[in-house]
Amino acid sequence: MQTRPYKGVPAEQRRAERREKLVRAGWELFGTRGIHGTRVDDVCTEAGLTKRYFYESFTDLDDLVGAVVDEAIRALADVVVPVIAEHGWRNPRPVFEAFASALLADPRTSRLLVEESGNPVLAAKRQVLIDQAVDLWLDADPDADPDPDRLALQRLLAHAMAGAAGEVAVAWAHGRIDLEGDVVIDHLVRIFERITPARLSPSTRESEASG
């Protein structure tokens, strides 16, 4: 049986709006007090909805965590992915700048994606995000060395730098690193350049050797 519109708003739209309120409430609570410090009742209070409407959209709190993380990842990817695609492996500074600015723009996002990664749902989704970002980062290098061993090393280093950049961004945001943001990014770029000889293609290595 088709549900009647309420005050002119179709039932499906009302359900979607309630779900969005719950996701926004979850993002606020998970990103401020943490996932382990949040209960279904807390989310409902924050959203201004009853538990009946929570279970209309989500099976449990982990289900909501998944939806909130999807939103956080989408927001981060919207900022970072175009920069990775444009600059890739050869010019890391814009990539680090975009990643840091996206995390620092909303401290809730950094807590969700980095500090709260002990949650199994979040950890799995975060790993997918990192894998996709690393793939994109490596694919963006038009002069990538085709040697499998060097590609494997590039992948290892890309994963290492992605994890390190995330931890550094969170530590800086929380005042544990007493440096200006530009200085932090400068050091990240220098570290990247120091540890990534594999970023050089055969032609680049040959030209550097001859120079």
Image: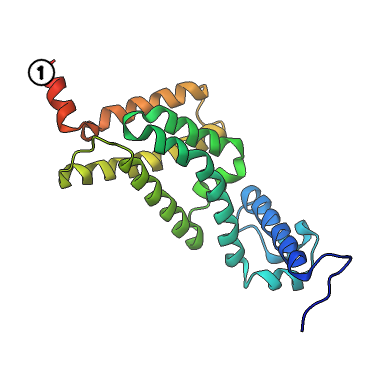
Residue at image coords 46%, 21%: 183
Residue placed under numbered mark 1 in the picture: 210
Q: Nearer the viewer, residue 22 or 166?
A: 22
Q: Going 55% across and 43% down the picture, which residue do you hit?
A: 110
**Snapshot quadrant of residue 187:** top left
Q: How many marks?
A: 1
Quarter in which the C terminus is drawn: top left
At horizontal 67% and vertical 58% (from top left) the residue drawn is: 23
Residue 101 vs residue 17, the one in the foreground: 17
Residue at 76 percent of width and 73 percent of height: 52
Question: Label 1 neighbourhood size at 10 Å, few (<14), some (14-19), many (20+)?
Answer: few
Q: Position of residue 200 (x, y in %)?
A: 21, 31
Q: Quadrant of residue 92?
A: top left
Which residue, as the protein is rendered here, is positioned at the far bottom? 1
Secondary structure under badge 1?
A: helix
Q: Is residue 85 left or right of 12 when viewed as pictured?
A: left
Q: In this view of the protein, which residue sits in the foreground, 36 or 194?
A: 194
Tell me residue 138's x, y (percent): 31, 42
Q: Position of residue 93 (x, y in %)?
A: 41, 27
Q: Amino acid at mark 1?
A: Ser
Residue 61 visible (yes or no)? yes
Q: Is residue 89 left or right of residue 83?
A: left
Relative to residue 48, is residue 211 depicted above or below? Answer: above
Task: Return the x and y of residue 159 as percentages of the image width and height.
Answer: 34, 44
Q: Is residue 16 above or below residue 100?
A: below
